[in-house]
Image (cartoon, rainbow, N blue to C red):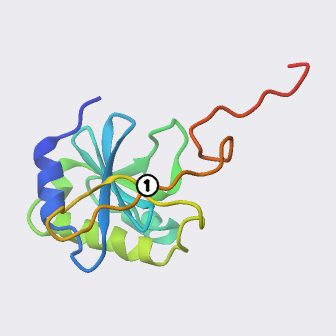
Amino acid sequence: MAYDEDLADRAREVMPTDAEVTERKMFGGLAFLLRGHMFAGIVGSELMVRIGSDAAERALELDHVREMDFTGRPMKNMIFVQPAGLRGPALERWIIAAADYARTLPPNSPGFQDTAQTANPATSPQPKLMIRSAGGHGSGLPRPRRRGT
C-alpha cells in the first residue's frame, strides 16, 4: 500500500524541531521516530499516532478517529486519524501530542541506534550505524528453530 506523499510532506513541516526526528519506510507506509520510538506515521491516506492508552481511548470519541488495527488486532496506545481530521492546525496538534508521548518513553535498548533518515536533514545530523549482536531480538535474522518442530 502506498502512502500519501502530500500528507507526509505536511507532516514533515510540523515535526518538532527541538529533537531529532527520523523517518523510515515500514509496512508500505512511512514511520516517524523519536529517540528510536515510532510515534507517528502515514499509512495510505491516514495519519497513525502513538499517544498512549488513555489518550487513545479519549481520542476514539472524536470524529475521524479510529482504532489502529493494522495487524488485525487493535493496538491500545495508537490510533488512525482520517484525512478529514487533519485539516488546518489539527495535523500539527496530533504530531505534537504523539511526540510528547514518545518523549515519556525510555530510550531504546543500549545497543540500538536508529539508522533511518532524518525527517529534516537540514537541522538533524545523520545517526551512526550500530549493529546488534547476530541473532538477537530485532537483529533482522530469523530466530533459531527448536529441534523437533
Q: Is residue 95 above or below residue 146?
A: below
The C terminus sits in image quarter: top right
Q: How many marks?
A: 1
Graded by Cα atoms within 10 Å as few (under 14), some (14 to 19) or many (20 or more), the crowding at tag 1 reads few
Look at the numbered disc 1 and give the secondary structure of its residue: loop
Does residue 48 show up?
no
Residue ID at (59%, 67%): 110
Does residue 118 show up?
yes
Report x, y in % for residue 124.
24, 69
Report x, y in % for residue 86.
17, 58
Residue 127 picture quarter: bottom left
Report x, y in % for residue 53.
52, 66
Residue ID at (91%, 19%): 148
Image position of 1 (left or right of 14): right
Residue ID at (33%, 34%): 28
The N terminus sits in image quarter: top left
Residue ID at (26%, 53%): 64
Give the labeled residue for mark 1. Answer: 129
24, 129: nearer the viewer: 129
Image position of 117 (left or right of 73): left
The amino acid beneath tag 1 is Leu
Report x, y in % for residue 24.
33, 48
Image position of 6 (left or right of 107): left
112, 29: nearer the viewer: 112
